[in-house]
Amino acid sequence: MAHSIRISYSACHGCVNCIKSCPTEAIRVIAGSITIIRDLCVDCGECLRACERKALGLDDDDWDIIRAHGEVDAMPDPTFFAQFGSYWYPDLAQEELSGNGINLLVDDLDDAFDLSAYSTAKMIEGLSKDQLPLISVYCPAVVRLIQLEFPELLSRLILVKNPIEIAAEMWRRRTKSFAPLTLISPCPAKITMVRDPVGNQPSSIHHVVSIRKVVHTLMASGVKVSSDNPRSESKGKRFAEWARRGGESKHVLKFSKRELSIIAVSGLRNTMDLLEQLELGRLRGVDFVECRTCDIGCFGGIACSESRFLSHMKHRNIQTDWILSPEREEQLAPLFQNEKLWKISEPIPSRQRLPLSSDLSEAMSRLKQMKAVFAELPHIDCGACGRPSCKAMAEDVAREQGEITDCIFKLREDISSLANQIISLADLPPNALKRIQPGKNIKVNPQRG
């Protein structure tokens, strides 16, 4: 399994803030060195937010090298257009950047997000109430979180490809081009979506760079688009609404022939709480669930440049074109019939945690050891051992990747016990000076005479 977090070992001071923020316990800090367990990482970016020393960063591609090879065909994430001093209307940004060697594929995004919303609405309408709610797959971190922590909900994931991937495929079919395509991403999850896609092999996108890196380069070169006086035909695109919480749901509702009951949440803790409620069967009557691990939606992505609060405020004030003509639905209907374009062909599998051993008998033995070690630990999950919890500590000991004395409390117990033994030994007189208590006889070895 791939992940998109880069580690700077020299910058780490062993503060363990990152291990406490990880929702899947994928990080260890041992002897001042960070380790990320790839199979457990969901690329939510929480560890990057927690690391104040910048020991963790994004592992994206080099934007300067990509630009050096000529004009760039770029697939911008919907959050891209609100990352500057003012909101960039997509058509104006497309026009301005085309003169700077960047071809923004705005029209393909428009078509792909419409198709995704249309397909989602049709799939919901085709199911009975006991098969609902379905869960959005737009946030790759949510999909990976469900694979790891909520496998019972995998059947709830709606098998519609991420619209960014649909847009890339539509562009290739339209242009018949095999030129490299670059995604401008707001988060590590979408970087991994390209490098290790779920249910869609391989990706139609070749490179991924962070929004922050692209925006800083553009602003340094003097690129500026004013939205104070946009053209009269300029309106916010529907796909841009997906950048904030509830935007995807609103788009789906526009294509639905019946009223839908929808819940939309953002933020990692809110997402996990909602998934727990759904797993327990407490969301009866809900048709569709939209989750984003970042606060306020994708505007809160760790790779964004602008403040998520300012981005959200500016975007909220933009008039979006929600008029869906009958002609538009007629255009989408034949695309919907072509399931290879938009549908994930196979169910999304679970991601199993690493077994204690490949041998069953050894795994059972290690499981007993893990339970025994866990019973001795203090159960306060302090993180001083470099693990996120006492359970993770016990598991590492069972895997022979640590000692129980890595726990500071167990180490103190052992030191205290050893100190008591030393004090006890210090009080003992030499053997030759020991006094014989009355009534006791000295045993003599007859072989020694």
Image (cartoon, rainbow, N blue to C red):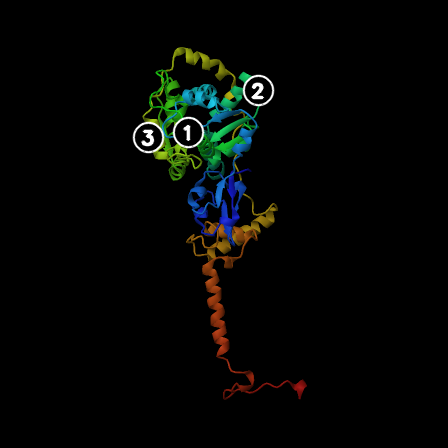
Disc 3 marks a residue whose amino acid type is Met
Q: At which x and y percent is residue 204?
A: 55, 25
Disc 2 marks a residue whose amino acid type is Ser
The earlier-in-sequence mark between 3 and 1 is: 1
Disc 1 marks a residue whose amino acid type is Thr
Q: Are marks 3 and 1 in contact (CB under 8 Å)?
A: no
Q: Is mark 3 on a helix, strand or loop?
A: helix
Please give the label number shown on residue 79: 1
The earlier-in-sequence mark between 1 and 2 is: 1
Q: Can residue 217 be seen in this view?
A: yes
- In this view, the residue farthest toward the front is 222
The earlier-in-sequence mark between 2 and 3 is: 2
Would you name the residue on which mark 2 appears?
A: 177
- Crowding at dot 1, Cα within 10 Å, few <14 / some 14-19 / many 20+, comes out as many
**What is the C-alpha distance between the residues marked 3 and 1?**
13 Å
Relative to residue 28, is residue 132 drawn left or right? left
Would you name the residue on which mark 3 appears?
A: 313
**What is the C-alpha distance between the residues marked 2 and 3?**
38 Å
Asked where in the image residue 253 lies, by quadrant, the reply is top left
- Crowding at dot 2, Cα within 10 Å, few <14 / some 14-19 / many 20+, comes out as few
Q: Is mark 1 on a helix, strand or loop?
A: helix
Residue 47's place in the image compared with 218, above or below, is below
Residue 192's place in the image compared with 317, above or below, is below
Q: At which x and y percent is residue 310?
A: 34, 33
**What is the C-alpha distance between the residues marked 1 and 2?**
26 Å
